[in-house]
Image (cartoon, grey):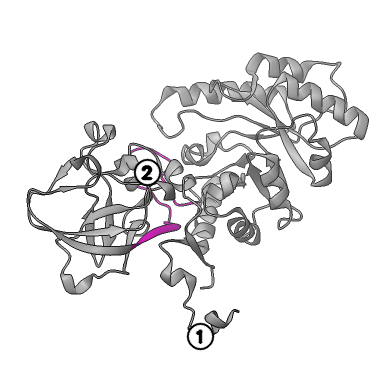
Amino acid sequence: MTDLQDAFILPDEFDIAPVRLTVDLGALVDNWREMARRSAPARTAAVVKADAYGLGIEDCGIALYEAGARDFFVAVLQEGMLLRSFAPDARIYVLSGIWPGQEAYFYENDLVPVLASEEQLSLWMAVTAEHGDHPCALQVDTGFNRLGLPLEEAIALADDVSRPASFSPVLVLSHLHSGDTPSSPLNQQQLASFHRIAEAFDGIELSLAASAGTFLGPDFHFDMTRPGIAVYGGEAVNDMPNPMKPVATAEARIIQIRDAKKGETVSYGGTYQLTRDSRLAVVSAGYADGYMRSLSGTGVPVRQAVAGGACGFIAGHRVPVVGRITMDLTIFDVTDVPPSQIRAGDYVELFGRNIPLDEAARAGGTIGYELLTSLGLRYERRYLFPDD
């Protein structure tokens, strides 16, 4: 410490942070176990891509590993290498596959590339021919038109007698594009296509369901499910009550509470005009913190489709965002909160236990996935462990 630091009593950084994020690892583990219960007898993997959906791959990955997860999915090589450092005997799948120059990293870190194209297949066959067998997975497109070998090409590959013996995937997977809409007939079409793949790759483990697909029932589970957003507390299925526990709570500190008169305007563009004498709380979060401009109360295009902007929560009250959200600041109308219950320095919940993640996301015309993965670097984080 410096002499100046010695002269002051330093508070806990979480207690004074402009924006802060609480991650309940106990709820995270409970959610994963609930998805495992719904998936049984299929195994349940854990998807920790995008820094565990913005909540921290190290802390979330360790919690899930200690809870019993042994199959993990990441998006890119770097995530897999980091995860390997604290999940020593897990099988880690890299969804973006492999590119030339990455071969040594897959072998050294025992990572499983998910091969999704003819180019990746050719590269991997050449790699294993030169360096020896190493597990891989094969992604097949059953109607998404995103990643994956086309259905007929995958079936032809399975039947190709000239296929190198070193090419033997440990998993064949696909992905549902409408799993969040259980009534969609497209789910059954994709399921039928995946059954064709299952017949072609007899004896190899299969995976079709992510979070939404897991809720569709046992027909979609096969050997392994891959829940992501549900584990982090988000909604996986449209128009269904969310059974998962909230995991993340984001809060922003009130910098100032100010009085404003009826008829005055608030924030950029003067797009919000007060209809009563009001008290306004200016908090230290904005779109640089992932609290997106589209969540604004007025003055953004999404308000033409979704009438109300986002709400925060403080002292037992929901408080609406008024005016446009800016880079570092958001303004809430706290007129209905008794003055004795709120002061500068208090924290407004942006989403969490009182403002559900997906409710906040819908106010911004988006989904919980985007809101979580857009969290900025300024949040001071606190992790609550399962025994806390």
In this orientation, which residue lies closer to the viewer: 344 or 189?
Answer: 344
Q: Residue 171, located in which quarter of the rendered image?
A: top right
Could you tell me which residue is drawn at 21 percent across and 72 percent down? 341
- Please tell me whether residue 241 belongs to the stretch shown in magenta: yes
> Residue flagged by tag 2: what amino acid is it?
Met
Give the foreground label among 1 and 2: 1
Would residue 140 appear left or right of 355 to someone viewing this image? right
Dominant secondary structure (helix, strand or loop) of the stretch shown in magenta: loop
Return the x and y of residue 293 as percentages of the image width and height.
34, 42
Tell me if mark 1 has few (under 14), some (14-19) or many (20+) residues whose alpha carbon lies within 10 angstroms of its own.
few
Span colored in magenta: 232-253
In the image, residue 285 above or below residue 77: below
Q: Is residue 40 visible?
A: no
- Find disc 1 in the rendering and name its residue: 7
Could you tell me which residue is drawn at 57 percent across and 83 percent down? 3
Tell me if mark 2 has few (under 14), some (14-19) or many (20+) residues whose alpha carbon lies within 10 angstroms of its own.
many
Could you tell me which residue is drawn at 75 percent across and 39 percent down? 112
Q: Residue 129, located in which quarter of the rendered image?
A: top right
In this orientation, which residue lies closer to the viewer: 7 or 378?
Answer: 7
- Find disc 2 in the rendering and name its residue: 292
Q: In 3D space, how far apart are the residues under numbered discs 1 and 2 (Cα atoms)?
A: 39 Å
In this orientation, which residue lies closer to the viewer: 120 or 260?
Answer: 260
Return the x and y of residue 203 as percentages of the image width and height.
75, 32
